Image: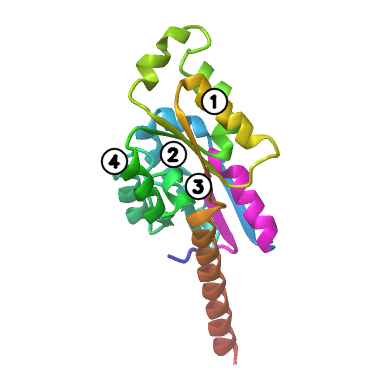
Amino acid sequence: MAFDGQGTLIIACGALAHEVAALRTANGWSALDVRCLPPELHNRPERIPAAVRDLIRESRPRYRSIFVAYGDCGTGGRLDEVLAGEGVERIPGAHCYEFYATGRAFAALADDEPGSFYLTDFLLRHFERLVIRGLGLDRHPELFPVYFGNYRRLVYLAQRPAENAEREARAIAGRMGLAFEYRFTGYGTLATSLVAAVERSDASTRNGEQRVGEWAS
C-alpha cells in the first residue's frame, strides 16, 4: 500500500537495529528511515501487534511505504492480522532465526535436533543481560537445568560476527552444557526482503512522478 508521504520506513525489532542499519549503509538507501521497538517486547509477544500498529499509524502520513522487519515472533498470527488491516507487509518467517538461516535451512536444523538453542549476533552480544540476568540465572544458577534441560545443542547463526564471537558462543554452549554448532548465515532473508521492499517503494515513487508529469502536460 502506498501512503501519502515520501521515502520508506522500516519498523524493526530492536534486535535487528544493527543489521538493518548495516544494510541501509551498504545499499546507500538515503531515503530509508528505521524505527525500532524494544527487543524486550519478545518477553511479552502479545504486546508486539499493538506496538507495531501504533507506530504504523503514527508514521503513515510521513512515508510513501512502510515495511515491518519482524517475524511472527510468538504472536500466534496476531501480528499478521494487524498488518493485513494496515496494508503493510513483513519479512516472511516465524522469527529471526528462520529468516537469517532462510526457511529451508532452518527447517533442516530444527528437524535434525528439535532441542536446539539459537544465538544470533545480537543475542550473543546481549546474552548476559537478556538471558542470564533476564531469567534470574545470575542469582539462581540452579535454575539452568529448569530452563535448558530439554536442549541438546546450541547453534550460533552468525550474521557479521566480531573477531572472538565464535569463541564466545562456544563458551556459552559449554556453560549451558550443550553441544555447539556454528553456521554463518549473513543477513539471509532480512537482506532480500528489505531490498525488495525498497525497490517496490522506488517503483511506486517513479510511477507517481510519471503520472504527475502526464497530468501536468
Residue 6 in the magenta stretch? The answer is yes
Depth-wise, is mark 2 or mark 4 nearer the camera?
A: 4
Q: Residue at x 63, y 55 (%)?
A: 23
Q: Mark 2 or 3 closer to N-term?
A: 2
Q: Which residue is mark 1?
A: 172
In this orientation, which residue lies closer to the viewer: 174 or 217? 174
In this orientation, which residue lies closer to the viewer: 85 or 26? 26
Q: Mark 2 or 4 closer to N-term?
A: 2
* Predominant SS along the magenta part: helix
Instruction: Give the spatial CA distance, label 4 vs label 1.
Output: 30 Å
Q: Mark 1 or 2 closer to N-term?
A: 2
Q: Is residue 21 left or right of residue 155?
A: right
Amino acid found under the numbered disc labelled 2: Ala
Q: Which residue is mark 4?
A: 76
Depth-wise, is mark 4 or mark 3 nearer the camera?
A: 4
Q: Residue at x 56, y 82 (%)?
A: 212
Q: Mark 3 or 1 closer to N-term?
A: 3
Residue 195: where, in percent of width, then height?
55, 64
Amino acid found under the numbered disc labelled 1: Ile
In this orientation, which residue lies closer to the viewer: 27 or 152? 152
Instruction: Give the spatial CA distance, label 2 vs label 4.
Output: 15 Å
In this orientation, which residue lies closer to the viewer: 4 or 141? 141
Above-or-below relation of 71 to 123: below
